[in-house]
Amino acid sequence: MAEGESPALSPEGAESAEGPPSNPSWERVQLARHPKRPHSRDYIQRLFTNFEELHGDRLFGDDKSIVAGMAKFEGQSVMVIGQQKGRDTREKLLRNFGMPKPEGYRKALRLMQLASKFRRPVITFIDTPGAYPGIDAEERGQAEAIAFNLREMARLLSPVISIIIGEGGSGGALALGVGNRVYMLENAYYSVIAPESCAAIIWRDSGKAPLAAAALRLTANDLLAMKLIDGIIPEPPAGAHMDPDLAAHLLRQPLKQALDELASLSTEQIVTERYLKFRHMGNFFDEARA
């Protein structure tokens, strides 16, 4: 290297004399997975009153990885639906580590349709590494349940606000993410595939997950730049796990603002806006040449 020449920058960050290059994307993934990070129940407890949990999909059973029910937010009746991971080993097993099975998605949709019947807004909290990939889930129609949710959410008559609070993994997250407004917490991630799975497919090495995280562009800043989300909700310094009360407080105002904005729209406008929002994703047009 010639004298005065700067070291090259890798895609993951700038190389420093102290160690390997920094990787902001992978750091965000680690924060999104922090064991003390607030989960859906933590936000429900802090943001809503009169929460009445509802259970079951009326077809198979009650999936504990989906927590849902009627509640009040700032005096307004809403339907709240969230993915719940669990804290200790016993609860993690009960909640299936936040990975819903088909009955979980069907329960969520049943309650969305109930809210739609009474024109109550739907608020979803997304926090899952992905839908459960086990044999029993596949036997009961995992892919069909997710696909059905996508279609039915697109035409719900009630406004839908989706917030990624931690991990937003693949179709397991998108099944609750077809919203009029989609927000991400600052240190959450939202991706078509988990970094480890991506690395295993592309490089045959899950240990290259940090490289995959950088390539996937899964951070809130990345997705906002691509217009795949509507806003980023800031977190307390060092992450939401450091101060869950402040994290909930920072979430309250954007949620209230979104509800107020959507309240001014007619039912037809709500459905059309949501439909067009997702139809336009991934479409690119060349500017007309002079």
Image (cartoon, helix red, strand yellow):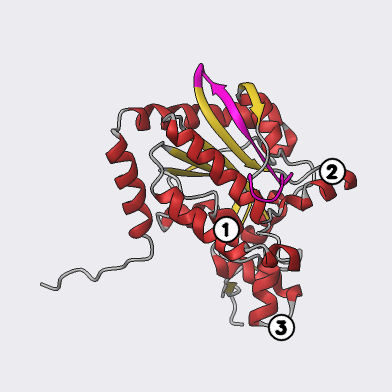
Residue drawn at 74 percent across, 68 percent down? 135
Tag 2: amino acid: Glu
Relative depth, front residue between 277 and 62:
62
Residue 70 lies in the magenta stretch: yes
Looking at the rendering, which quadrant does residue 116 occupy? top left
Residue drawn at 30 percent across, 32 percent down? 265
| Residue 191 appears in the picture as rendered | no
Q: Residues within 10 Å of mark 3 (few under 14, many from 20)?
A: few
Where is residue 124 shown, x and y percent of the image? 56, 40
Residue position marked by numbered label 3 in the rendering: 204
Relative depth, front residue between 23 and 56:
56
CB atoms of marks 2 and 3 within 8 Å: no
Residue drawn at 60 percent across, 51 percent down? 105
Residue drawn at 57 percent across, 58 percent down? 145
Residue position marked by numbered label 1 in the rendering: 145
Where is residue 16 shown, x and y percent of the image? 69, 65
Residue position marked by numbered label 2 in the rendering: 91
Magenta part of the chain: 58-76
Relative depth, front residue between 46 and 17:
46
